[in-house]
Image: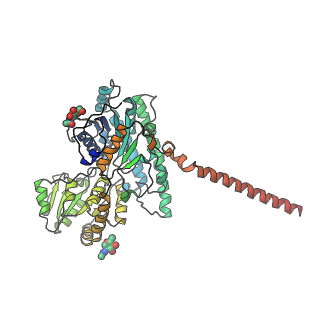
Amino acid sequence: MMQACRTLALLVFPLLSGFELCSASKILVISMVASPSHSIWCNKLAELLVNRGHTVTILDTHPSRKKLANLTTYIFEGAYTYREQLDYMDSMWNSPKYAIDFLFEANLLSCRYMLQSPAFKRFLSEHSNDKKPFDLIIHDITNCESFLGLVHFLGNPKLVLVTPFGECQALYVKGSQGHMVHSPFQLTHFSHPMSFDEKLKNLFYTLYNYYVYHKYVNTLDGYSKEIFGQSIPHVLEIGKSAAVALVNAHPILDGAKYYSPAIVHIPGFHIDEPKKLDEETQSFLDDAKHGAIYFSLGTNIKSSLMSKDRIMIFLNTFEKLKQRVLWKFENENIKNIPENVKISKWFSQNDVLAHLNIKLFITHNGLLSTQEAIHHGIPMISMPFFLDQHGLSKKLTKQGIAVALSYATLSEHSVQQAIEEVLTNISYTKEIKRLSKIFKDQPMKPKELALYWIEHVLKNEDHKYLQPPETFLSTFELIFFDLKTILGTILGLVIAFLACSCSNKKQIKLKQN
Ligand SMILES: *[C@@H]1O[C@H](CO)[C@@H](O)[C@H](O)[C@H]1NC(C)=O
Ligand SMILES: *[C@@H]1O[C@H](CO)[C@@H](O)[C@H](O)[C@H]1NC(C)=O
């Protein structure tokens, strides 16, 4: 149960001081997605909650995040094992079916490893005697649903779902799956409005994903029962008991849709107020008289994974530019770097994109990077590699805020043309500045909104009022067994019966004649 209300020492947001203060609570964040971007995002959430005065424990896949008082981290070993034989550069990633299969296979593998990891065993033994060690559990619903078994193991505290990966599974769990049939599926290349052909393919991928997801989630439920006992509820049922899902979606990228009130959008949650860059990067950008280009392929796909000839294509093209180039490149062995190019293993990307001299972002279009580009109004060259990146790339080029570049057919000519197009045709910058204004103009900052909802759940016992009846229906029931279908079937049968008896009467008349 809730502790007595105590005033929180630290108020991170002056705006929030208008809210009734919530008691300092003990919160567990489960961040089990083996992708650095998920770990970064969930750690930002943990940090936010700690700064607000809560005591937070995070189960994480990635070492070396921020150390804070009142933040305890367990790092689960083995999460990234699936990557050992992975080729991000393979053109197979263009196929949505391949992407769906991969996503669930890789997740099963990394979940399995993490459930067996020494850190998890240590966490369980350290919390097995405590009846209810946490007031609230926050779970990244993108995958590894086995860990939802912890809700039961830890005495059924309140549950909030989150995902940095668009809407993904949150829609199934929180009762908004109905519209998935009508909206472009995340791993396809389709965007609104879809042609008839695209709608058919989209329906196929949506249903295929639904089928594979349920197979996968049943396997994960099996893992959960192995650890927490056969009598605990199915992991999806535990997921459905969550009060709200905080999802990283915005109509600009995800389309305008109907959502259950239990789905709350916090787009760009991870984007902080820009800070000053380190001295060297700051002066490199400050002195870029003709502007600068930022090039990064994110944290999964590294620039250094590109083939040698592709790396040379970029270096040769950059050398001919007036602009300066910051390139996130993860290997120091790169030679013959032109004077106008600065490489580093890591840049504080959000602060780089906020710099006024940045005119162009060459990106893989991971969702978090894409949102940062839109937030700061920087037009893009889009070179997607896998999962949702292809679909995002299509959307952005359709919206006129990015030029697409194909890694498979990369040449000095194609790179130079793409750069020239974005830098000389003002329409890309104009359009993304327009979208930036919309993206940033939210009634509450996404961080404040996330805090508001998490504390709303902590303060109130009941959250059933947020749950639409669809939460508790399967997609099959939702699509095929609604009232319309039943009434339509009855009407069809009546018409068929009338038609039959009419033709029978005619036949009888004919016989009489
Ligand atoms: C950590 O939590 C304790 C207990 O809630 C609190 O008294 C203390 O001020 C917190 N420390 C920090 C640095 O937030
Ligand atoms: C600039 O780009 C936009 C969007 O792709 C395009 O519609 C327009 O024709 C381009 N203008 C010129 C002068 O190339």
Q: Quadrant of the C terminus?
A: bottom right
Q: Is residue 399 above or below residue 257?
A: below
The colour mode here is rainbow
Q: Seen from this angle, which residue lies furthest right? A: 513
Tell me the quadrant of ligand 2.
bottom left
Residue 24's image quarter?
A: top left
Residue 66's image quarter?
A: top left
Q: Quadrant of the N terminus?
A: top left
What is the x, y in percent for residue 412?
Answer: 24, 67
In the image, 51: left or right of 85? left
Of 449 and 434, the residue lying toward us: 449
Instruction: Please tell me which residue is depicted at 75% across the width and 56% down the height of the picture.
Output: 500
Of 347 and 413, the residue lying toward us: 347
Residue 147's image quarter?
A: top left
What is the x, y in percent for residue 355?
Answer: 18, 60
What is the x, y in percent for residue 136?
Answer: 34, 36
Residue 382 visible? The answer is no
Residue 369 visible? The answer is yes
Of 380 and 333, the residue lying toward us: 380
Instruction: Please tell me which residue is depicted at 35% across the width and 65% down the height of the picture.
Output: 399
Q: Across the whole image, how many numbered discs are drawn on residues? A: 0
